Image (cartoon, rainbow, N blue to C red):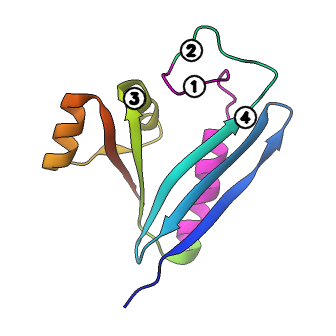
Amino acid sequence: MWLMKTLLISGCTNQRGAGHILAHTYPNILMIVDVMLVNPYEPVTPQKYDFQEYHGLGLFAELLENAIQYCKQEGIQEIYLTAADIPLKKHFEKYGFVVHDTWMGKAALEVGQGIPMSMYL
């Protein structure tokens, strides 16, 4: 039997904004369920990504590094997330995430939404 933990990874508050990752842990996977990056002083016009409201804050890399350090401490070997659309898929690939080579991954790529991705540590 295994337990699922829910945790909030943060620590990215600076002059650019603030960032948090909400995640669940399974026996060997950190599953990112939400990422929030906020800078209410610089709204994006036009938006680069469908779900982007603010200019690139440069906070995701710092949040991801915090998540990686947590995984190393806990012996977790995979970080999983779902890219909302193709532009975000490309963004996450820059950090080392890959699309799952499964029927679900292939179907999500065809639709262009809900794309399952993982980073293997």
Q: Identify the residue position indicated by label 1 in the image.
A: 52
Q: Quadrant of residue 54?
A: top right
For discs 2 and 3, the disc positioned in front in the rendered view:
2
Give the residue at mark 2: 47
Residue 27 occupies quadrant: bottom left
Q: Are marks 4 and 3 in contact (CB under 8 Å)?
A: no
Image quadrant in which you'd find residue 114:
top left
Amino acid tagged 1: Gln
Residue type for callout 3:
Lys
- Quadrant (top left/top right/bottom left/bottom right) for the C terminus: bottom left
Q: Quick check: marks 1 and 2 in contact, CB under 8 Å?
A: yes
Q: Is residue 74 left or right of residue 94?
A: right
* Residue 68 position (above or below residue 41): below
Query: First in sequence: mark 1 or mark 2?
Result: 2
**Residue located beneath label 3 in the image:** 90
Label 4 or label 1, whichever comes before in sequence order: 4
For the magenta stretch, what is the residue range? Answer: 49-72
Work out whether mark 3 precedes mark 1 in sequence or the reverse, and give the earlier one. Answer: 1
Calculate the distance from the C-alpha at mark 2 to the C-alpha at mark 3: 16 Å
**At which x and y percent is residue 83?**
40, 39
